[in-house]
Image: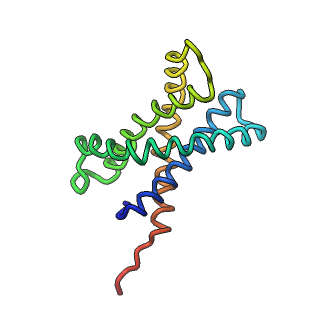
């Protein structure tokens, strides 16, 4: 969808914002035994830390790697567009979820010598949410917003 570096930047910021927002609310709710109004400020504070990490990991690393892997499985312009979209999103989540779970474990959970099992549990708990949020909500929302922001003028 993005055609220029500026558009890639805007798309990346939008995707990062909505993914990090949802995942921070989700993880705050998990830690608190359910999300309440008291969890929102906590999630927003954590979002301020996780947003730049997620953006850098996604924009500079995973967004370069994920299409190469995804497009070995599907071919844009040949395969059905929804299949291409879902495979691309799935590959991105498959890389981003363990990476961001790593950072969240390191920064917020302070597991000490139990790092590996705490990180693995964090990843396993986050993956279903990250996958379904990306495929069914965040991805469609960001693509809609992106198309709205960069609406092409139709030739008359």
What residue do we see at 31% from left, 49% from top?
Answer: 84
Residue 44 placement (x, y as % from top left): 68, 44
Can you say which quadrant of the picture contains the C terminus? bottom left
- Residue at 62% over, 38% down: 24
Q: Position of residue 115 (x, y in %)?
A: 53, 17
Image coloring type: rainbow
Q: Can you give x and y, in whole percent of width and height, for residue 111 in the image?
A: 59, 18
> Which residue extends farthest right?
38
50 displayed left or right of 135: right
Left or right: 121 as drawn, with respect to 93: right
Q: Looking at the figure, which quarter contains the N terminus?
A: bottom left
Which residue is at 31% across, 54% downward? 81
Q: Which of 86 and 107 is in front in this view?
A: 107
Q: Residue at x 22, y 42 (%)?
A: 72
The answer to whether 29 is drawn above or below residue 72 in the figure is above
- Count how many numbered circles sit on residues in the image: 0
Check the image and name the residue furthest to the bottom. Answer: 156
Residue 7, x across and y down, in percent: 42, 62
């Amino acid at each position: 969808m993005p055609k220029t570096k500026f558009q890639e930047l805007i798309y990346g910021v939008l995707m990062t914002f909505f993914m990090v927002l949802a995942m921070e609310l989700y993880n705050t709710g998990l830690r608190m035994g359910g999300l309440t109004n008291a969890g929102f400020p906590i999630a927003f504070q954590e979002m301020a830390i996780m947003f730049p990490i997620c953006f850098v990991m996604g924009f500079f690393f995973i967004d370069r790697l994920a299409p190469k892997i995804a497009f070995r499985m599907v071919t844009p312009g040949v395969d059905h567009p929804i299949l291409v979209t879902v495979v691309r999103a799935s590959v991105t989540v498959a890389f981003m979820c363990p990476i961001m779970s790593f950072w969240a474990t390191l920064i917020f959970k302070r597991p000490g010598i139990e790092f590996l099992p705490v990180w693995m549990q964090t990843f396993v708990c986050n993956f279903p949410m990250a996958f379904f949020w990306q495929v069914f909500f965040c991805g469609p929302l960001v693509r809609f917003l992106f198309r709205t922001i960069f609406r092409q003028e139709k030739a008359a």
